[in-house]
Amino acid sequence: MQGRVISNISNLYTIEANNNIYSCNARGKLKEDGIVVGDIVDFNENENIIEKVEDRSNYIKRPKIANITQIICVISAKNPKPDLLMLDKQLAYAEFIGIKPVIIINKIDLDERKVKEIKDIYGNIEYPILATNAKENKGIEDINKILENNISVFAGNSGVGKSTLLNDIFGEEITKSGIISNKNKKGKNTTTNITLYKLKENEYIADTPGFSTFDVSEIDSKDLAIYFKEFKDKIKNCEFIGCRHIKEENCGIKEAVNCGKISENRYENYIKIYEYLKDKEEHKW
């Protein structure tokens, strides 16, 4: 039988298959190679043993999860201040692994000017943007639409309203069972394990306690520019092959920034992320 791993606690894997739930162990070699939440596996339902892990469409190292289709990046308009550097890291990572990102701006009632500013920056590069006020249940219908037929991971800093949004999506009855992380990001059952929760057929949300952002250090600094979506078609205008788009002259990306075709804020964040990656590479050993 084939199913999807929806949780893993102490190498006991919970698998959903045909709307039924199975608890399975794995053969030694598979356990060593690593089975993660989201994996599609073949298992023997009589012996409760996983026999094979199917090829993954993608894999995220932190949090360890496979085969997701959508990253939902949550920021707040205010309290806390929107962290656009972290958002740009998340968007670059989503482009890197080939997963669709969606931006949610929560707490829109607190700073309408900032909401417009963020929409202008990211709407111009055609990222889907949803505006919500989780406390008043505003925008939840729009979120439900983008969740359809997707396996989604929510990411965002503490305090942006992820838990409130998830409460709105799941409903009070489900959240009482301890699915959504509390203020300590440990969950009501004090677990930090990742779990996939099914909303509808082919529609899951990953609850990832304690998780805020992805590890962009998987990206090579020399490749970073291609994961800034609006940079890609400007690179061909650079005079030098291997242009880093920082100090070089006759750089297509810098010219686009000067002409207002690329957001100055995005470009500044590109430089910060590039320098972070370069420093990591130079001090790897």
Image (spheres, grey):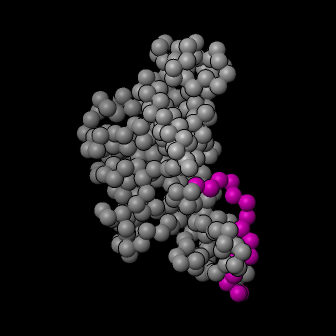
The picture places residue 191, in percent across and down from the top left corner, at: 42, 72
Q: Position of residue 252 (x, y in %)?
A: 58, 17
**Residue displayed at 29% across by 33% down:** 112
275 w.r.t. 18: above or below = above
Judging depth in this view, the residue of 247 and 252 nearest the camera is 247
State the extent of the magenta-drawn residues as a range.
Answer: 46-60
Q: Is residue 154 left or right of residue 225?
A: left
In the drawing, does residue 139 fall left or right of residue 193? left
Left or right placement of residue 52 versus residue 205 in this view: right
Examine the rendering and report whether any part of residue 195 can be seen: yes
Viewer-side residue, 137 vs 112:
112
* Residue located farthest toward the bottom when viewing the structure as drawn: 47
Question: In the drawing, does residue 40 fall left or right of residue 111?
Answer: right
Q: Quadrant of residue 241?
A: top right
Could you tell me which quadrant the N terminus lies in? bottom right
Residue 52 image position (x, y, % from top left) = 74, 71
At a point 55% along the width and 61% down the height, the residue shown is: 64
- Residue 27 is a magenta residue: no
Query: At 71% across and 68% down in the image, what residue appears?
Result: 53
Depicted 196 relative to depicted 225: above or below: below
| Residue found 46% across the figure and 61% down from its top | 208
* Residue 58 on the magenta segment: yes
Say how many tags the image has: 0
Residue 145 seen in render: no
- Is residue 137 placed above or below 252 in the rendered structure? below
Depth check: give the residue in front, 273 or 25: 273
